[in-house]
Amino acid sequence: MAREHYIPLRITDLVSYLCSHSGINGEPPLAEEHQTAFRRFAAAVIAHLHTLYQTEIRQLKEAYAAFDPDADPPPLVPLTAAQRASALDQLFQTFDRLMIRANYVRLSRHAIEEVMRGASAWGLEMDVPWEAFERVEMYYRGEGIGYRVRRTWWKLWRRELVAVPTFGRVAVIFKQRAHPRLGTDPDTQSVFLKLFKDMPQMDVEMLLPGGRVRMPKIDRLKLGGTVASSVAYVAWKLSTFPLVSLLGGLTTGVLMALYTPLALIAGYGYKTWYTFQSARQTYALQLTQSLYYQNLDNNSGVMYRLLDEAEEQETREVLLAYYYLWRFAGSRGWTAEELDFAIERDLSALLRTPINFEVLDALHKLARGGLLDCDHERYRVVPIAVAEDRLAALWQQYARPEPSPSPL
């Protein structure tokens, strides 16, 4: 299983776990006074990062205001065409940075097409009109296995659980352009954001508008063969009748001779078409019902949720890096590799899933906050009382007319 950068642990649970942690070499848990000190430190870190992200929320709201289909109220002064083009580029770049900080992975156009290649577990394949989008990006976080219910005639329509590869989270951002698949009056001015959970990988094309279920090749061959055989049979049958009869018009005898075989061929063609239409409707209904519960948020709500996820993730990283260096590194300090190994080992054992800790990112945040010392690539953190004083001194920055970014 691939190691996740994301740490699936609530901050409250993380702080409680660290306070009761028995240590990497069987040391006893923290003494009560040390637990109290670490909880105060954690509260200060949480507050500072939350203040920073509140500033980012305001900036993102301004960047998205001109493209938000749900804006209420809309901007007072509309942007010019040149301003919209520049703002659109800025919005997509900002969203990409946000996804990276929230530990999402970008799917390139080639990667999306590879994921969507082939039929789903229901034997149907989607066709996505890429030309219907001026800009489109897709991101995911977490890979796993999900289960869907399927019924087949050869198993007497009994319920069967089918294992399907899934993405834990999928985020999509796109801007449409005029296209027949999008209807007569598509919204080509807005930028749409969608966030879903537990999506089957082969169904991610359903998250984009304009998709259409494609008839399987075998059914297309059957239907095409039915039409071709019908035309060929009529031509052959007509050629067997005397020319005089044909010139005099199609007699009742000619029509009766053609009726039975043509009815059989047409009936088989209709059965093939109807079976495909029924399968398509069933598949669309199943996906609609599934997406009802898998949709997490839309448009500006996606921004808020992703910012919250990024804030939580960065808070976890700072708390973990500080705690392990504070408690176990000693005066000699640890290298980045030693810190990374200790955290990943404990988290993987606790969560029972491989974790890839962003150690350099965490060290960088501690260094910017003045909480880290480095000597010959060995890292130590300042004592917790000093760390609390330095965090308290940072609050003065937020009282300025234009607050500076938090060092954390």
Image (cartoon, rainbow, N blue to C red):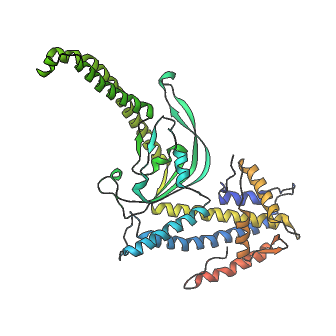
Quarter of the image for the C terminus: give it.
bottom right
Which residue appears at 77% of the width and 60% of the height? 340
Viewer-proximal residue, 81 or 189? 81
Q: Residue furthest left?
A: 248
Q: Is residue 33 left or right of residue 74?
A: right
Q: Residue 63 in the image: state x and y as whole percent.
A: 47, 71
Viewer-proximal residue, 182 or 384? 182
Q: Is residue 79 left or right of residue 117?
A: left
Which residue appears at 64% of the width and 76% of the height? 406
Relative to 215, is 379 above or below? Answer: below
Viewer-proximal residue, 258 or 340? 258
Q: Residue furthest bottom?
A: 401
**Can you see residue 249?**
no
Relative to 178, is 224 above or below? Answer: above
Relative to 272, is 406 above or below? Answer: below
Q: Residue 125 in the image: state x and y as whole percent.
A: 46, 40
Q: Residue furthest front?
A: 243
Q: Is residue 10 left or right of residue 178?
A: right
Which residue appears at 74% of the width and 56% of the height? 17
Q: Residue 86 in the image: state x and y as whole percent.
A: 45, 73
Q: Residue 157 in the image: state x and y as whole percent.
A: 48, 24
**Can you see residue 150?**
yes
Q: Quadrant of residue 215?
A: top left
Q: Is residue 61 left or right of residue 32?
A: left
State the count of labels: 0
